[in-house]
Amino acid sequence: MIPRPALCALRFGTGLPVPAGAPLDAAAMLDALAGPDLAAASRPVAGFAEARPLLAAVETARSARRRKRERQPTDGQAGAEAEETAVAEAQAALRALAGAGLRATVARAVGAADGFRERLARFWADHFTVRARKAADLPLVLAFTEDAIRPHLTGRFADLLRAATLHPAMLLSLDQAGSVGPNSRAGQRRDRGLNENLARELIELHTLGVGATYAQDDVRQLAELLTGLTVDPAEGFVFRPQWAEPGTETVLGKTYSGKGMEPIRQVLDDLAARPETLAHLARKLAAHFVADDPPADLVAALTEAWRASDGDLHAVCAALLGHDAAWDGPLAKARQPWDFTVAALKALGLDGDGVAGLPDGAFRRRVVQPMAGMGQPFGAPSGPDGWAEEAEAWITPQGLAARVAWAMTQPSALTRGRLPDPATFAQRALGPVADDRLLWAVARAETRALGVGLVLSSPAFNRR
Amino acid sequence: MDRRFFLRGLSALGCSAAAHPFLTTVTLAGSDGGAPLGDHRLVVVILRGAMDGLDVVRPLGDPDYAALRPTLAGQTAPLPLGGGFALHPALAGLHGLWSAGEAGFVHAVSTPYRDKRSHFDGQDLLEAGTGTDLAPQARRDGWLNRLLQAVPGVVADTAFAVGREALPLLAGPAPTRSWTPELKLDLSAQGRRLLEQVWHDDPLFRDSGLAALDLAAETDPVALEAGAMPVAADRGTADIDRLVDFAAGKLRQETRIAAFSLSGWDTHVRQEAAIRGPLLRLERIVLRLKQQLGPQVWGQTAFLAMTEFGRTVHENGSRGTDHGTGGVMLTAGGALRGGQVLGRWPGLAEAALYDRRDLMPTSDVRAWAAWVMAGLYGFDRRVLEGAVFPGLDMGSDPGLVR
């Protein structure tokens, strides 16, 4: 039986040791969650409004370079040095913004007293995956979490769904921004048409789930209903009535008519309230926090809390933390590389300021790149379904080897050669879950680096 | 393994007295004195994201094609393959192999997956190799693993999953290995022994960890590259070369089956540009594999690249294509007869389409894979139709294996 305060940090938080003021029981965790997002306030990350001018500057510089090259086609790049420099500078500014945002995101998770909020933010950002398909997309991914996810962690799911669906990063990531109703004014005039991508993932991933009963025609009609949602480079999200498919659409048996955003808001609310959505998301939450194959009564309790509260996510969290299964059993989940890295930084004695103070190169080499090596490049899963949940997907030979490589080498650099005593470190990182076999091995390590590396490579540290 | 799943496969034989496929001693063609799977190599690549077969092997001879693909049909000059088909120009490097009979295609193939057109469900089914009558959570093993379960004397090195991602295609109770060649572990002998102790009581960590220690000890380490964040679309071919070189090194030794995946095929927008990168990487995989295996081993190799489903026959409104049904499989290797576009062509007339939007599948991609395995390794048809691909009707032998 693992003591509850340790489970708060290990299963529902970002690891041990917990910072001063961290909630150590369910009631305190729920109180903290109901309060303001202190981590976001103290370490700001650029939202879309702040990132937009920098994204636009890259586009402007690129078009200037293209025009210059077209005027001097035979000279190749010669003669366009000024334009090249302008593109490079605009890209550097965007990279710096992304770097600062990622840095703040790690620093929040490492330093926050309210670790449950950080975990929920990652869970919902993953549920509504927007992907960085190239490095320049990272500011959008970070802005999405900031604008659409974090403000809605404890509100109604319907509000979260709406914010996520209408965010420019989602509209761009799932190609909605270019979808035009074939019979709309723009569709008739120009050779453009429908793109089904967002409509499909809205049903399949974000709400009902692929196990639910729906048909291609539901996807198609939802795609028609969503036409008009797009992104304007200057304004961000906009609704263009001239792109919207005219007429009524029928999605999952309900007919939507009317103009403008109203039917879109309505269909999103309806999708949010479907019983399949409740069942899908209750199971997904339980699987994320408790066990890959979660106990049926836990899933039932979450579904019921969701139904009774009309999708109030704070009430759903209360049901999760209020269930015996949440405090029961062994730590059966695998920490994903993000969780592993955050917990390791904490255990090595870094706090939020420590992360913020790492030189850029060190942050990249010791934090960002290793996560990719362990199989989780930040913001860039291979599909819109986000990261795998099961332990087997992460603790592969190559994934575990990358963790061991990190565990054996990076702690020395991150502690500037002042490695902790390995036995003390085991207690600090693992508390009551430090097992005898691990402590036996740690005591036989020939160097501090090996001892610390064994702790970070152990099943106890890599499970949650 | 899940026993119900297994029995379900058997019942498809319609004969409860059929021998337990996993206990049947399979006589293997080309077996060199009892080594499992003999000398033939099988390489399977899963193309994640739904490759647009109609763009890769273009049906120029079909009267409806040009109108369905107004921008995709016109902009680049494809290479003629005969029979009214032409090859996407980004695969020009494979045209020599095609002419030599060492690369070919099967058109209008699909798994039994229909209608929902979900990448993830589609890939699950492709890798499980089952029909659609099993609940997704019942599809525990990949079909390559079930193939190995039917072979006596398989060792872990017999089959390799290469790359960072887990590969459900090879998952299951038969021993396999997985590794990515860019990892390096500097550990003392004492460090190794202590790690083995630390992992001992957790089977997942013990199995993965011991495999990692073995592989790290034997692979030539290449340190992780410094530089920008690795993001899929920005990668060159250095990672592909590392993967292929590692797989080829294993295949030259004890390994007979290698599998990996290649993503980037979900070309909803501006497909002409978007599909080039993945095609160049696919081409690189084939050419590099041939070079690294050397003529003798390449001559004993069958290479299959398959995707979860094809894409809509119509271009969409963003000069891309959406999720469809029938698609294309690429075959290569000296063990297979290339230089032909196999599969019955269903036509692109509206009435001939699946659901009036997708290329109509005219054969099951599993049947082609099954005949390849039968031809390479001499598997009994009952094993292939009952255990490897439960419920499959292989039909008649297309003669793909030389």
Image (spheres, coloured by chain):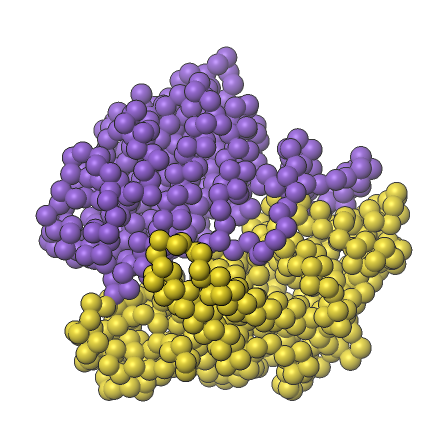
The answer to whether one can see residue A241 in this image is yes
Task: Compare residues B129 and A374 and report the one nearer the observer.
Answer: A374
Determine whether A457 is above or below A347 in the image.
Answer: above
Q: Is residue B140 above or below residue A75?
A: above
Task: Name the quadrant of the N terminus of chain A.
Answer: bottom right
Residue at 22% across, 35% down: B81
User: In the rendered image, which quarter is residue B128 located in?
Assistant: top left
Front residue (pair B314, B238): B238
Q: In the rendered view, tell whether residue A288 sits above or below residue B122.
A: below
Chain letter of the purple region: B
Residue A18, percent from left and from top: 77, 71
Residue at the (53%, 43%) spot, across then down: B239
So how many labels did they put on this image? 0
Asked if residue A447 lies left or right of residue A371, the reply is right
- Residue B378 pos. (x, y %): 37, 21
Chain identifier of the yellow chain = A
Q: Which percent across, then down, holds residue B176?
A: 55, 35
Which of these two is toward me, A381 or B18?
Answer: A381
x and y, in percent, of residue A85 in the image: 52, 64
On screen, residue B98 above or below A266? above
**Quarter-of-image position of residue A333:** bottom right
Query: Which residue appears at 33% of the width and 43% of the height?
Result: B90
